[in-house]
Amino acid sequence: MKKPDRVTITTFWLDWLLLPIMLGAGWLTFRWALADFNLASSPGAGGTALPPWAVAVPLAVCAVGWVILGFGSLIRQEYYEHRIWIAILTAWSISCLIGAGLIGLSFLQGDSSYGLAGVLSLIGLVLTALMLSLPAFMQVPLGAKAIRFSRQWTVLLAVCLGCLTAGTLLGFPYNFPRFPFGIGALFFFGLGALEATTSMPTFPWLPRLYDLEMEQETFLAGLPRSNVWRLEGAAKLGIGVVAAAVLIITAL
């Protein structure tokens, strides 16, 4: 993949449709970061003595990531688009691990009242970090492997969201475990829309980001085509819309 001489902006409607969604997710994420900072600054709040700035770090990083990704998705060239995505996925993985580390540190201090909510949130954050970083260590799945990978990755994403949802409903006080809702909404909505329009599994695009040698034509030719993916894509698109709605409602 050769570096292009200049940067051009895409005209694909879905990329422009995702821009306001990502910017909105960044705004909501930043609001959550401020809320976590204020909660950690309150005496006796949050169930831990962690520094307020540390509690706000995971969501602050993710808020910046949403903005960069939103504008970066408008770049037409694969060379830059892939690198932006790799940087964002890496940053999000690190943010998840920081959040999990904060919860783990609270348990080690012995003064946390998180209980089961904290355990589920920790598991969800660790699994999310695994989910985001796993594509960097695998070959691009094609053919039958693409079908298997897409469905396995979808299940892993659903488990992450389930753990984090349960942790929130059980009363975990901070917002930083919630940002994978936005990530999940992005993947379900964006990749689901592509599956519904292209009749191909699109989750293999994640490991494709890290392969600088494979030609685009080879990759697309190796993805199976079926109307089944239109149905699965429509279902994922619906899940993405619901997840985005939950994200907005819980932020109000």
Image (cartoon, rainbow, N blue to C red):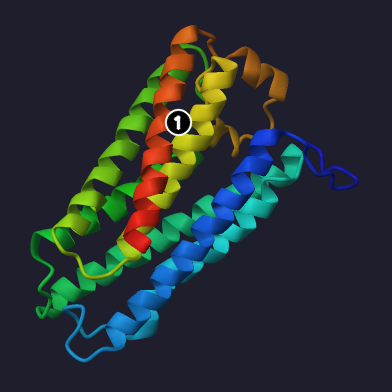
Quadrant in the picture for residue 115: bottom left
Question: In this orientation, does residue 171 appear?
Answer: yes
Rendering coords of residue 73 (x, y %): 67, 46
Q: Residue furthest right?
A: 5
For the N terminus, which image quadrant? top right
Question: Where is mark 1, residue-wise?
Answer: 237
Q: Give residue 226's position: percent from left, percent from top.
A: 50, 7
Q: Determine the secondary structure under disc 1.
A: helix
Q: Residue furthest top?
A: 226
- Give amino acid for label 1: Leu
Residue 18 in percent (x, y) is at: 60, 44
Of residue 248 and residue 26, the one placed in the foreground of this image is 248
Residue depicted at x 72% and y 45% = 74
State the residue in front, 81 or 18. 18
Question: Horizontal and vertical percent for residue 121?
Answer: 23, 57
Mark 1 closeness class: few <14, some 14–19, many ≥20 residues within 10 Å:
many
User: Relative to residue 224, is residue 109 depicted above or below?
Assistant: below
The correct choice, above or below, for 77 with respect to 57 in the image is: above
Q: Residue at x 19, y 65 (%)?
A: 172
Taking the image as drawn, is residue 204 in sight?
A: no
Residue at screen point 29% across, 67% down: 101
When the figure is inspected, residue 142 is found, relative to residue 159, above or below; the finding is above
Task: Using the image, determine if residue 190 lies above or below residue 223.
Answer: below
Q: Nearer the viewer, residue 19 or 48?
A: 19
Residue 1 as seen in the image, left or right of residue 46: right
At x 67%, y 17%, the residue is 218
Q: In the picture provided, is 202 more to the left or to the right than 42?
A: right
